[in-house]
Image (tube, grey):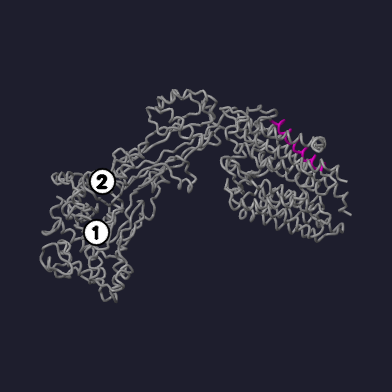
Amino acid sequence: MTDRNSIIGKVDWPLLLMFFALVLIGWLSIYSAGMSEDHHAIYDITQFCGKQMIWIGISLAVGFVILLLDAKFFDAFAFWIYAVVVFLLVVVLVYGKATKGATSWIDFGGGVKLQPSEFAKLGAALALASLLGRQDADLKQRKTRIAAYCIIMVPAALVLLQHDAGSALVFASFIFVLYREGMPGAGAVMLLAVVAVTIFVLTLLWSTKVMCIVIGSLFVLTLAYFLLNKKKGLWTMVAVFVFFFAFVFAVDYAFYDILEAHQRTRIEVILGLNDDIKDAGYNLHQSRIAIGSGGVLGKGFLQGTQTKYDFVPEQHTDFIFCTIGEEAGFKGSLVVILLYVGLLIRIIRMAERQKLAFSRIYGYAIAGIIFVHVAINIGMTIGLVPVIGIPLPFLSYGGSSLLAFTIMLAIFVKQDANRLKIL
Amino acid sequence: MRYSPRNLAKRQYVIIGIFAVVGVVYLMKLFSLQVLDDELKQSADNNVLRYVTQYPARGKVFDRNGELLVFNEAVYDLMVVPGQVSKEMDTTEFCRLLNITHDSYVERITKARKYSRIKASVFVSQISKEDYAHIGEILYRYPGFYFQTRTIRHYPSAIAAHTLGDIGEVDQRQLEEDPYYKRGDYVGKSGIEKFYEKELRGKKGLKVVMVDVHNREKGSYLNGLLDSLPVPGKDIYLGMDAQLQAYGEQLMHGKIGSIVAIEPKTGQILAFVTSPTYDPNLLVGRVRGENYNKLLNDPEKPLINRAISGTYPPGSTFKMVNGMIALQSGSITPATQFHCNGPGSTPIKCTHFHGSSPDLANAIENSCNPYFYEAFKTTINNPKFGDIKKGYEYWYQMTQALGLGHKFDTDIPYELPGNIPTRAYYDKQYGGKWNSVTIRSLGIGQGEILVTPLQLANIAALIANEGYYYPPHLIRAFGDSTAIPEKMTTRMETGIEQRHIKVIKAGMNSVFEGSHGTARGSKIPGISAGGKTGTAQNPHGDNHSIFIAFAPVEDPQIALSIIIENGGYGSTWAAPIASLMMEKYIKGYTERPAVEERMMNGVINYAIKKKK
């Protein structure tokens, strides 16, 4: 009894308030996006907004139950939960129904469908936290690193087999955890990833020849610096540049031979190499018009025109940010982005105050997941990232996504509330 | 010491830094999009966009003399965008306007809503010009509804239904195969509409217009940046002579069969008659489905184009083929004579009474069966081939060169290949033990041989040309003077020398001119023609009446084949009709109105002629 009363006092209210604010904004936006000439009530369950309301109710109930559970439960059962989601991913591959080229649903009948890939991230975060949280776990040891890789790669590979490249990409977010937990080279990998993306973009924009000249000149300058200052690590430096050169040549191959046609055009559209606003660039063009037309103050709630009439595709799911941009303007975008950044920083700060390694690691894992989702989704609607269909956490229409992210957050809140009991 | 817990904890600031930097970059981008960029705001003025497909005019079809065979007529589809339909709309009035029931209204709007609330669907298709004018005046009262102009095909002279073909709504398979098509588009389903679909259809355009909430067009979106103009389809000129085609259809009235007339010098088809036929105007617009089913269930099968999908034993018309191959292989000479015992001949009887022993020209004139059996036997048994199997293979190869046993594959969909049995077929059939007596029927065009009327007409054309042909085809030219496919203008050599064919030609001339000629009764005044009758035995009823011919002999303008199912002797129906066709084409009129009248009014009672 006392436990139930005390939990209200111990939860991190700033975090929960940001969460509630995002869910509310999402619900109102879904309502607005579904509006047209015939008006529906916001609780009309035949509409997206009504269904979302039911899912919000379910998610809050499940989240509340989690707060009542024993905090040790999730560490203890992490691998069981992980095993179940991996099993579900296999089931979905075998029996799942194809939707939009990605086999990702389990249909329970009666209109209830679940997307196991949304829960796979949660499972992987728990398992990784449980593994790295052990006393004997050490990322400097190969054994630990291999185990960590496996935990991440198995669900990622299964999701990729469903042709859901977007969700598979999210598993890359675990690099933040590995970096924080001191895996040798994790920082270098993050840096290299940034450099690789830069080289990829510049090579496509400029051509291989120009890139060779640019990297060649950089190499000569760096070499001169190393030799003049008698720096150590000359060979590592040379190896890095060899890698860069190889990468430049690999870009064309990767771009034309590995990527599928639609992925290629999406990248071309982003880079401005393909300005066909009728076909491939249509989504981006329409979504930018919607957001851009919002201005500073927006057109007002329910007053958006672009997001109503299907000009923006998938307006209630992956492109929900368009509705906010159009109707609430720059002030709305500002609020949403500040809420997300605030939420993420809050999670990191909370993670650092944990006494249990499990809780800390888990916090970093979910912060990474939420960050990648937000960065890709909003980046896609404003034309900074190619179109990759993954939902905006807490805002997008979709029960699986909302439920998974709520559970993710609730588990962390419970761990945090419990920290003072740890001696 | 780099990895001490204290040092690792500092890494939170790197991660927080990354989050913050991305947040700031995104806010900067949003600031530029939402605050600095004015253009995007105008784009999304408080207007709704409507995507109007601009349908190109489908190409017209003309005959060889420029007579219009197919053109377009405007009809109007009433479109609906369910999401824009007003709730306060007066549906009763609207239903009365469209002359539909309220149930039908609900059904249509539900179907459209199911497809998309935002994208337009066809609400009522193909509204006539009159209704369009009437409804169009008050349509502004009904937001969400608008008209889209479309065209349907119209056939002014109502001839050549099978050749011209028809258009209908695109089916699921085509929708998947070709992204050009959208649901509800019209495509060629048969005839040249199908074969020249890509040329005739042109290219669709798109117009994006802004409309206000009152359904009024507010002008072009983004100054027409997204718009594209439709490209009209190409016009097509056929080799067909519309007058001759119409005449042929009149002559075939009351009979089942076909007429194929070819211009020998080009391979262009002058007339392509199949009977019974139907009015092509029956298969357009809203009545198409109903009429199509009626035609489909008609026991005389008017939808079948017998000129290409009917296969018949060629009967005696095949004697020319055997004559040419025998001469070319050196197995006989024009002077070679074979004995004929009349009806007492073995293994094949002669059905005609004539003097013995005929030479080749005589044998053609009299259609002597024993002569051509002997000529065929002599050819495949010719010692120069070694054995009969090799001889048969030579004979088979020659029939292929003469355009038999395979499709021409030009621009006529649904053509059948006919049948010339291969050596392998007989080896299998008779376990390798067969000789010239086994396959004797081939000598007189019976047995397993099947030809299409198109192939028979081509035989007449290559004899008229004295040794070559152009694959028979329908197209003469495109309106924009694009070259027609090379395949149709490639001269095909048959391998039969001119001197041999001259003999055959002379024989065919005496079929009209000779004192015993089987078609002497159908001689055309003032024109010297060549021909050959055929009477094909038919296990399903009375014999088919067949005739192939060309005229004038000196410089052939027309070559043709005629088949009248269950018409009896070739000379009864087929020969007179052929002579009228040739006379009409060359002279423009006939000097034998009595024959014309007899043929046009002649009706064959198929209930009696066809056995069950």
Q: Earlier in the sequence, mark 2 or mark 1?
A: 2
Which residue in the protein does label 2 denote? B276
Numbered disc 1: secondary structure = loop
B130 left or right, relative to A158:
left
User: What's the distance in space between the residues labelled 2 and 1, CA to CA?
Assistant: 21 Å
Q: Is residue B132 magenta?
A: no
Could you tell me which chain the residue with mark 2 belongs to? B
Q: Is residue B35 left or right of residue B167?
A: right
Position of residue A100 relative to residue B138, above or below, is below
Query: Is residue B499 visible in the rendered structure shown here?
Result: no
Q: Is residue A172 left or right of residue A41?
A: right
Q: Is residue B321 visible?
A: yes
Task: Identify residue for label 1.
Answer: B314
Q: Position of residue B555 (x, y in %)?
A: 23, 55
Task: Check disc 1 and give the amino acid type.
Answer: Pro
Front-most of residues B470 and B252: B252
The residue at the point 34 percent across, 56 percent down is B408
Q: Residue furthest front?
A: A1
Identify the magenta region.
A329-350
Vertical position of residue A215 compared to residue A345: above or below:
below
Q: In which quadrant will I find the N terminus of chain B?
A: bottom right
- On the image, the x and y values in percent for residue B111 come to 48, 35
Q: State the residue in front, B577 or A323.
A: A323
Crowding around mark 2 (Cα neighbors within 10 Å: few <14, some 14 to 19, many 20+) is many
Q: Position of residue A291 (x, y in %)?
A: 66, 34
